[in-house]
Image: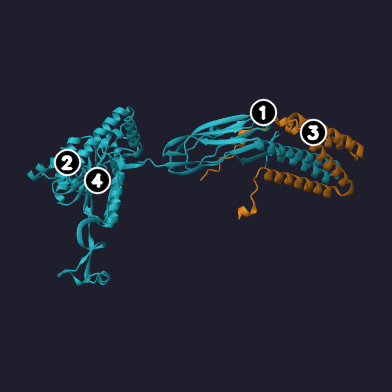
Chain colours: A cyan, B orange
Amino acid sequence: MDPTGRFWATAGAGALLAALGVIFARPELVVGAAAVGAILLARQYAFVQTLRGLDADLAVELVTDAQYVRRDGTTEVTLTVGVPSATPLPLAVTASLPVIAGSVDREARTVVLEPGDESGTATFELKWPVVGRATIPAPTVSVTDAFGLFTESFQRGREATVRVEPRQPQNVHVGEGGDAVSAAFGGHRADQRGQGTDPAELRQYVPGDSVSNIDWKATARLAYPHVREYEVETDRRTVLVVDHRGRLAEGPEGETKFDYLREVALTVAAAADSANDPLGLYAVGDDGLTLEEQPSTTSEHYRELRTLLHGLEPTEGSGTGAIATQGAVAARRAATTLTDDDTAFGRTLRPYFDRTEGYVRRMDDDPLFGTMRTYVDRLGSDHWVLLFTDDADRPRLRETIRLALANGNHVVCFLTPSVLFERGGLADLDDAYQRYADFESFRRELAALDRVTAYEVGPGERLSALLSDGRRR
Amino acid sequence: MTASADSASVSDISPSASPTATWLALAAVVLGHVGLLVVFPDGTGLVPVVVLEGGLLAIAAGSELLFGGRDRGTVGVLGFAWLLLVGGAVLATRVWDPLIAAFALVCVVALLSYALHRVELVALGLVEVADERE
């Protein structure tokens, strides 16, 4: 209970009477002070009693229309206050805001009930610009007595919790024909026997085997010298070819085709890091190659690749690449040098270095195909080429994969079906299912190629919804 | 993770009684006792004081009934408090020095007020239990 200015003015008047009574030695004024004290006590008692009754009758409810929201999303919050027997005192109920929520005018989130009112509601929209878990505290009830001498504030109702999630792909599906698969990266079996850590088989000793390979326990048990062999593990030289052309920006903000592909690429990069597989990265924008990182196994390299992947964004048609790499910097330096070079050599080369900003190399042809032909092809054989793109240009993609296979490489293709990302793509489920079936037949066609594995990548919920509807039909 | 600064909303509400109603009883008490001094400059007997206090109690009770929610219980408490404090003050000033009587009066009012404050905190569940605080 907090005294107000009116209370202190009244108490001050009583104190003044008492003081004057003492100063002038007039007991009547002291008696007057006692009368003021009686008025204050009676009003305080009345406030306490009324407040107890009101609290027993008061119902406060705070409801949000969603417990999960994406960053920058909004939730509708409804504050309902009810006093079935009508409130005897003026009261205000205010919803407080978590720190990570956007601001809302206090009037908009306050319900004010005048004496005699039975209920009131306030509805307001709350924006969530920061990711995290937020608790909307229980609303604060503020009451004042009839004469404005006292106020009281206390919390009633329940708090509400809202989880704000980042705008990034949720439930990333990687699979085949709607069935999720878990791709294995890391220690890779070579189907060879020799030195290693995983036991493979036990066989009889033959002349020529090293004595150090004899398994003495098995020899004692089997009464003949036996040799234990181990699974030979190999490093898988892996190259990520990431398509970040403009068309991969299709989809809701934070959940575009490219966002899903990037999640998979980051997972692959982390797996390669833990398995110590040499990992390279080539990123392809609309006008050519934007990143070139040769395979390497240093920890700084893996970290750098992850940073580069995080920084990649879909390019715009004739714009610049998202990230200038060492190669792009070198290309710009060369272009600058050639600007001042008036020799025949300089004049001949200059056109090839024009407009190279942000790109390691511009390509007039299909940049993905050009990258595969110019860069990946020269890496040598026995690489695992992981291609991240969509299904928009199927004939060209087919050629690109065939080219990647040329040196005996293996190709793992991660494709985003366009139908899962188009705005209103699932509005006509019949048509959407047909398009997905078309995509699936294309994926199978690719997967049927020797040394090619093809996976679909996309939002799991949308794909499940599409497939369940298709199966029901 | 909550914002605490903006939770109070007392400014959104105003008392149901007007300021005039709030000050009515107080003004009557002050003016009545000052008037008593003017009418009886050499001191008063018990009867004028009782008559005056009875009249002031009637004004205060009427003010409570008119503007304070028509609660007879409050009027009863007012009468009891009036009897206790005013009667006690009359007796105290006749027995003790006015200074001691005034001091005793202030102490009694403060103690009763604080007791009501604690009762309210307990009734609304706003008191922290010592074990929980630790």
Q: Secondary structure at mark 1?
A: loop
Sequence-wise, the earlier of marks 2 and 1 is 1
Question: Measured from the top left, where is residue B9 in percent x and y?
Answer: 60, 37
Q: Residue at x 10, y 42 (%)?
A: A347
Q: Which mark is residue B60?
A: 3
Lateral position of residue B52 relative to residue A76, left or right = right
Q: Is residue A425 above or below residue A296?
A: above
Residue A147 in sight: yes
* Tag shown at residue A324: 4
Instruction: Using the numbered discs, state the Cα–Cα distance from disc 2 to disc 3 in whole angstroms.
Output: 96 Å
Q: Which picture quadrant has residue B113?
A: top right
Chain at numbered mark 1: A
**Residue assigned mark 1:** A116
Foreground label between 1 and 4? 1
- Locate residue A292 relative to residue A1 in the image: left or right: left
Instruction: State the residue position of label 2.
Output: A400
